[in-house]
Image (tube, rainbow, N blue to C red):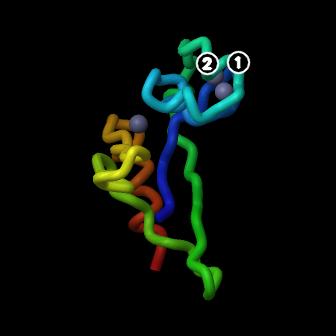
Amino acid sequence: MSVLVHECRTCGHNATWHESRERAYTACRCCIAGTADPDPEPTLRPTWTSPGGRLEPLAPPGTVRNERTMHQTVTCDCEACRAAYDHHSTRSP
Ligand SMILES: [Zn+2]
Ligand SMILES: [Zn+2]
Ligand SMILES: [Zn+2]
């Protein structure tokens, strides 16, 4: 599924990677330090179907992903993400 993420303006990684639960999985100094500088505007992280290569649908804000695994995440549902979701979901066929 394609997702909207807030990137850290310091290191460019997903801002949630800076949270204690996630930062064990990265070698990035900024992430490990735990102080993200999240970009208020979300960035679209597209994913493509395999096989097929079609753009996968965008996960609506607040969607739980990888449920019941140690990598469970919830997509951000801030105002900027909801606006971006509306923008992308109305534009796609
Ligand atoms: Zn960072
Ligand atoms: Zn980082
Ligand atoms: Zn957001």
Residue at image point 56% right, 74% down:
55
Query: Residue flagged by tag 1: what amino acid is it?
Result: Arg
Q: Which residue is mark 2?
A: 32
Query: Looking at the image, do the residues carrying marks 1 and 2 touch, with CB atoms under 8 Å apart?
Result: yes
Q: Which residue is mark 1?
A: 29
45 to 29, vertically: above or below: below
- Between 15 and 90, which is closer to the camera in this rendering? 15
11 to 54, vertically: above or below: above
For residue 27, what is the image quadrant? top right
Disc 1 residue lies near ligand 2 with CB under 8 A: yes
Residue at image point 53% right, 24% down:
18
Residue at image point 67% right, 18% down:
30
Q: Is residue 19 left or right of residue 44?
A: left
SS for tag 2? helix
Q: Position of residue 34 (x, y in %)?
A: 54, 15
SS for tag 1? helix
Q: Position of residue 93 (x, y in %)?
A: 46, 80
Q: Position of residue 64 (x, y in %)?
A: 30, 51
